[in-house]
Image: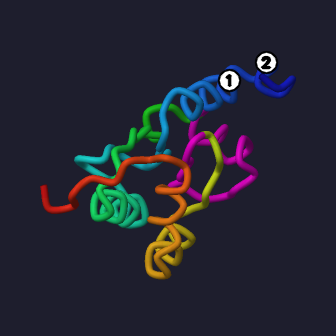
Amino acid sequence: MTDQAVANPVHAFIADTVKEHDVVLFMKGTPDAPRCGFSSLAVQILDHVGASFVGVDVLQDEALRDGIKTFSDWPTIPQLYVKGEFVGGSDIVREMFNAGELQTLLTDKGVPLGDADA
């Protein structure tokens, strides 16, 4: 764990979450009920490729909402992590999906992709 994570319990929570789960989406709302269009788009893309993921609702905790931005040094939400690595926000996820790069990244990282229509 980094010195930064030790000093900041929110960063420690984020670090633990992305370590424990293969695919994590820090988002506004939940995967079943996204509360912004960008979060909804990211959920739809992950569902479409059949990636199992954990959604973390940043609206439940202001410290988490602010902390995720400083943790990744990325100013917007949602934020996608795959195998502990920050991938990007909604625009990057969409661009990667459209180019076929998201599916490749997930497969290369060993994330099983299920049947999107299941």
Label 2 environment density (alpha carbons within 10 Å; few <14, some 14–19, many ≥20): few
Q: As drawn, is 40 to the left or to the right of 115?
A: right
Task: Please provide percent x and percent y for residue 79.
Answer: 55, 53
| Of 106 and 18, the residue lying toward us | 106
Task: Please provide percent x and percent y for residue 106.
Answer: 49, 56
Residue occupying the point 77% across, 22% down: 1
- Pointers 1 and 2 in contact (CB under 8 A)? yes
Residue occupying the point 35% across, 65% down: 45
Q: Which residues are magenta?
A: 63-83
Report which quarter residue 117 is drawn in: bottom left
What amino acid is found at the position of numbered circle 2 in the picture?
Val
* Residue tagged 1: 12
Q: As drawn, is 96 to the left or to the right of 29?
A: right
Mark number, residue 6 = 2
Locate the C terminus and report the quarter of the image it occupies: bottom left
Report which quarter residue 62 is drawn in: top right
Was residue 112 drawn as part of the magenta stretch in this picture? no
Label 1 environment density (alpha carbons within 10 Å; few <14, some 14–19, many ≥20): some
